[in-house]
Amino acid sequence: MSDAPTNEQRKSKEFDPDHFRMTIGDHLEELRIRLVLGLLGFVVAAGVCMCLKEPVMRFFLRPLMNALASNKLPPQVSFTEVSESFTVYIEVSLIVGTAIASPWLLYQIWQFVASGLYPRERKYITKYLPLSITLLITGMVFLYTVVLPLMMEFFLSFNYGPAFAVGPAATDVAATTQPAVVVPFLHGDPPNPLNGQIWLDLTQERLKISYNGDIRSIPFGLEGVANPLITLSQYISMVVRMLLSFGVAFQLPLVVLALVRIGILEVQTLKRARRVVYFVITVIAAFIVPDVVTGMVALMVPLVLLFEMGLWMAGRPPAKE
């Protein structure tokens, strides 16, 4: 057994963890180095995201804005606390920064863990870790591009009909003798609005007025009993929670493979229990996406296919060591 690695061995591209063993002090020093390097990568990525505030927030809000616009609602969210907008901006920057820096973070974790694993264990990790990361990213992309727009469209289009009046309907006859005020309909804002000029922006479904060089807007909704008032923090929290849920749910093939390889279950047992598994998948999909018409089905179908993919992977003979 050889001694602890030297600096030359650490820098060598042919560094092999099997050639030596680290002492406890060496492990702690290695852990410190990896933590510092990982933290530096995360700080850089989060800093870049903070500088790109507008594109990052627009990326998160785009599915909601598109659904609001398609339902003729003002594409705008609200916040109920003074610091809510800033807090959400920091939260989103940190989350996106973590996602961008994740390959670097995983590399640092692998460099620390690899020296403590047997060759067979390292072989399994290097074989299936890329698939796990691919499934994680696929689940998040699938949510953002397919499920989230369907969910937003379904929920925002659901309403209870026109608002009702309390008491008998009445008509103001005097209104017919008054001159009508006609607000111009524009697709956007006029190039040089006059002070006090009023117009209806059809692209944003807002009534706007020019006031002392600034444009003020009044959002309005449909004539329904209920109109949405969506807060920024609630929407971002929902999207982040669902991104993580979809990323974890798409690890199903590897879970099936692990259960079979460890010996907890057999492939034939899982095949005979397909109906039970499909029912469990339906319950999980309903829990993650509480939308029976669109979102739940959009998650349930990929999970069923991923389960079948796991059966296929588990049914293949393991590679020779």
Image: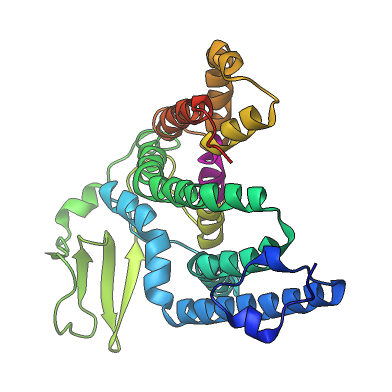
Residue 270: give x, y in percent of width and height. Answer: 58, 18
Q: 97 above or below 75? A: below
Residue 316: give x, y in percent of width and height. Answer: 49, 27
Q: Please tell me which residue is depicted at 49% across the width and 31% down the height of the picture.
A: 313
Query: Is 34 on the left-hand or right-hand side of 155?
Result: right
Front residue of this view, candidates 192 and 295: 295
Q: Is residue 318 visible?
A: yes
Residue 199, quarter of the rendered image: bottom left
Rendered-image quadrant of the C terminus: top right
Task: Give the farthest residue toward the right.
Answer: 24
Question: Magenta: predominant secondary structure element?
Answer: helix
Q: Please tell me which residue is depicted at 67% across the width and 75% down the height of the picture.
A: 34
Q: Assess whether residue 137 is covered by the magenta stretch.
A: no
Q: Is residue 92 visible?
A: no
- State the colouring used for the structure image: rainbow
Query: Is 57 on the left-hand or right-hand side of 1?
Result: left
Q: Please tell me which residue is depicted at 20% across the width and 78% down the height of the picture.
A: 197
Task: Give the farthest residue toward the top.
Answer: 272
Q: How many marks?
A: 0
Front residue of this view, candidates 307 and 126: 126
Residue 153, quarter of the rendered image: top left
Task: Give the farthest residue toward the bottom.
Answer: 212
Q: 52 above or below 153? A: below
Q: Please tell me which residue is depicted at 71% across the width and 56% down the height of the picture.
A: 117
Rendered-image quadrant of the N terminus: bottom right
Residue 56, quarter of the rendered image: bottom left
Residue 302: give x, y in percent of width and height. Answer: 42, 33
Q: 250 above or below 111? A: above
Q: Which residues are magenta?
A: 242-252
Residue 184: give x, y in percent of width and height. Answer: 13, 65
